[in-house]
Image: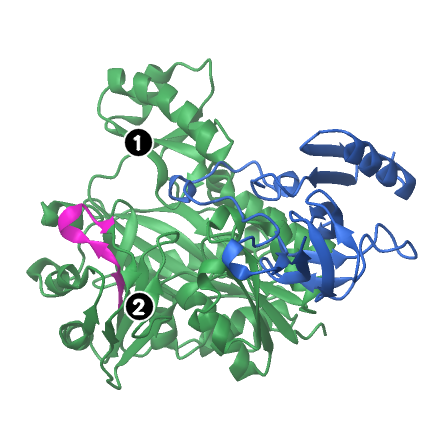
Chain colours: A green, B blue
Amino acid sequence: MKRIKRVFVANRGEIALRIVNACRELGVETVVGASKADRNGLAAREADRAVTIGPAPASESYLRDDLVVQAALGTGCDAIHPGYGFLSESPKLAARAAENGLIFIGPPPEVIELSGDKLRARDEAARAGVPVLPGKEIARDDDVRQAGDEIGYPVLVKAAGGGGGRGIKLARDPDELGNLVSLARSEAGAAFGDERVYLERFVASARHVEVQIAADEHGAVVHLGERDCSVQRRYQKVIEEAPAPDLDAATRNALTAEAVAFANAIGYRNLGTVEFILDVDTGEHYFLEINCRIQVEHPVTEAITGRDLVKLQIHIAGGEPLGFAQSDVVFDGHAIECRLNAEDVARGFMPSPGRLSLFAVPENLHLRVDTHLYPGASIPPYYDSLMAKLIGHAEGRDAAIDVLQEALEDLDVEGVETNRMLLISVLGHDDFHRGAVTTDWLERAIV
Amino acid sequence: MPLSDDDVREILRIIDESDLGELRIQTDGFALHVVRGDRKIDGPAPARSPRSRQPEEAPATAPPPAHKADPADGPLTTIEAPMLGTFYRAEAPGKPPFVDVGQRVQPDTIVCIIEVMKMMNSVTAGVSGTILQIFAANAELVEYGQPLFEVERA
């Protein structure tokens, strides 16, 4: 057994603190690799040790797999936890860690690579019997119009190297498609170093539902239920919940079974999320992509399953068996998470970095708050604007909504602009209360 | 073909005698990047991934020069690590250290090597003066910005 004794935390913000706390509870030491801007942050202070891996810009610190591995080795760590974002889905970091005798807390590099290639992932999903949307790769010499006609309009142009909502364009007719394909190709080449693009049928009215899976190194794969993340702005999730509201049992069973089958088929290890798109008009569901990391929204799953997913990641990476079967996974109540961001909603969601003169989150038995911030803390301009995740957990959905609304109203925050009022109005909206909003709902509601 | 210690010494000698500001040499399994201390170092370039810079990272990306020069500091100053990595006082085990306490240095004097994943990055003094103290221990991890040497300005 390669039990993990000291974890290098290659991330920042709330997730770095979350990993530090999980490790402490497991009796595992932590070293946080912070940028200069985060050197005095809460994660760095709470860890057993912190090292400055580089200057503030992520490209010189959090995105440098060489510095991360060097720092992990130099501080005597035996594992690296990449958190989410940054290098969390970098096959290069996973491979480099392994080459240097370090455990990467995540799937093996070849699985990360497959997941990052959205075209290959689509093919593998189809092979595993998971429904995928009609679509096809567009090679340089292909007849774009013919491909567009086959799939039907409007049609999405997607980058094989994209994912997470990046590199997607919508074409309404053949002329637009012709232009967008060449634009998408050059943009994809520049952004992802991969020019390949493909067409995929556009689902006008869609929900985003994803399944949490866990796979150990001994072949066991389970799911931990689904999450609905349909409240999005520009493909970025704003509010997430578990279970998905008003999901019929047949669809739920199909989604979870397919997620497990897909994970089995590709030799998945550790925690992951299989994302699906649900066509509200037809009731059909389709594979979207698989994410090889802990998700921002993992706490809603933790709330209703009573299982600590970050500890589970470490446990699995240490070679231990899952320790529970699918039948042991039971769900309790309803949980909703909203993301409090430092952004100016009135000014087109512009990031609003700055120093918090006031920051106090209310306490409530049904409320969990994951944050790295405190009064006097500063939000640097270099990274994403996530300030805190508020998670309400109650017996029913309405009660969970109430917990969050009350918490957001009682929250004291001064010094930066936040999206608090937006969150309050979404939670109070009739459409949201009825359940099942679609992924384009929030953007239409804002206008 | 890997570079030998003698090759590295030879390269350093050539650079010392030339007016090159920066030199990169890369062969299979070995890379050397030497930057003179009086240059603005635009990050530890040889190890950088091909990823393009993100727009928000444009301002103030250049790490500070190895030494913190501020006339208000008085005669004492420190040479800081321009990157995280393993600190080496000499080119190779058993070789004499680049500098020792009491030694005079010029801005372009190499004071140590910092290794990041087999990339050897030479660090120059960036200041004229005398080494008073060596803070970092040989072969140990140093952090970005960590004081390595104390120098009394000439």
Q: Is residue A153 visible?
A: yes
Residue A416 located left or right of residue A36: left
Residue, x 89% and y 43% (percent of image)? B5
Q: Chain of mark 1?
A: A
Residue A103, placed above or below residue A177 = below
Q: Which residue is mark 1?
A: A169
Assign a secondary structure to mark 1.
strand
Residue A332 located left or right of residue A40: left
Image position, residue A189 (x, y; %): 47, 28
Quarter occupied by the C terminus of chain A: top left
| Residue range (magenta) | A337-350
Q: Which residue is mark 2?
A: A389
Decide: few, some or many residues near mark 2? Use Cα within 10 Å; few <14, some 14-19, many ≥20: many
The residue furthest left is A430
Residue A37 located left or right of residue A133: right
Mark sitting earlier along the chain (2/1): 1
Q: For the residue marked with disc 2, what is the amino acid? A: Lys
Residue A48, placed above or below residue A441 = below
Of residues A338 and A305, the one nearer the viewer is A338
Assign a secondary structure to mark 2.
strand
